[in-house]
Amino acid sequence: MKLALALSGGGIRGCAHLGVMLALEQAGIVVDAIAGTSSGAIAAMIFTRETKEHKALTYQKLEAIGRMGYAELEYLFHPPKITNPLDAKSRFESLSKTVAGWEKVIRGGVFGAGLVSAEALRSSLIAMTGGGRFEDSPIPLAFLAVDIITGERVILRQGSMLEAALASSAIPGVFPPVQIDGRFLVDGHVLENVPVSVAKEIVPDALVLAVDVGDESGAPSIPKTSLDVILRSAHISRDALRRQSLEQADLILRLNDLPGGAFEYGQCQALFEAGVARTNAMLPEILKALEKHP
């Protein structure tokens, strides 16, 4: 019986996907295809290109990609503490770096198509995976992106896996769209953060296991600012789309309750280990479903 995975986006929380894939492989369960959105696409790319001997350490590669590719965002939103507040030189250097960083981001946001350049992320992906093409993957892969001009979903299955992963993870407004075959593509989570429909298209007769690592935003509260209203509205939209996707799945592995935000790189190993543990706990259910699946 065939099994296809649908791996959601979630930033560095995608480390949990690596644990899921490792646990399935160690249990002898063959995965016939993988569909990925955003960090789900990057995780699939890393895992399928790694040798069997090193798959238990793939989370280190995803952590390194995050630290290099999203370094500007991490510094701007989580700036390092001033080591000596009484030292004028230390305060000046920290302030100078912060101002320089925001100046770069403002230029990118006002005069460019994204707050930060995608070059650091591209370079880190090349360094950690070497790139590669879909045609060379041992498992059929498909990455979901969205055409920012037409609003159409775009399933990437051929050519450069690197460019496809960049397109699928190009967070709108943060990274500029990635141009592929004349289309301007952004993060697939805009339409389907858990790409169940894509997995079904790759292998129509497969059982689809949806793996959701999206971060839960906690209990809803009364918005106090205009930003709160915007963020809450976006969350409602994402939740509705996620529920629609998950309704199509045959099995769901929920990892969205795990601690750690999308840019908390220090949580990578814990997320990876949680992915392994949760999958192992679910193995009887997965094996039973595979036996029953027509």
Image: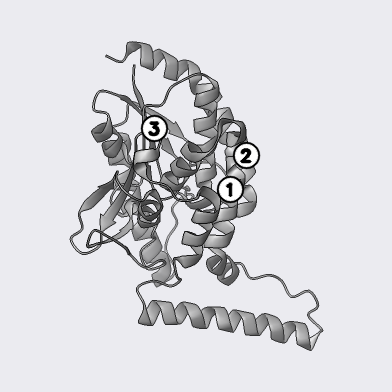
Q: Residue 188 appears at what percent x and percent y?
A: 32, 52
Q: Is residue 29 left or right of residue 111?
A: right
Give amino acid for label 2.
Answer: Leu
Query: Is there any visible trace of residue 213 in the rendered image?
Result: no
Pick the front one: 78 or 184: 184
Residue on which the image places disc 1: 61
Q: Quadrant of residue 1?
A: top left
Pick the front one: 47 or 109: 47
Q: Is residue 106 left or right of residue 207?
A: right
- The reply to whether the C-beta atoms of the residues labelled 3 and 1 are less than 8 Å apart is no
Residue on which the image places disc 2: 57
SS at mark 2 in the image: helix
Which residue occupies 59% across, 51% down?
63
Pick the front one: 172 or 222: 172
Q: Residue 189 appears at what percent x and percent y?
A: 34, 51
Which residue occupies 51% across, 32% down?
20
Pick the front one: 77 or 12: 12
Give amino acid for label 3.
Answer: Ile
Q: Residue 58 appears at what percent x and percent y?
A: 58, 41
Above or below 194: residue 166: below
Which residue occupies 49% across, 22% down?
282
Residue on which the image places disc 3: 139
Calculate the distance from the C-alpha at mark 3 to the C-alpha at mark 2. 20 Å
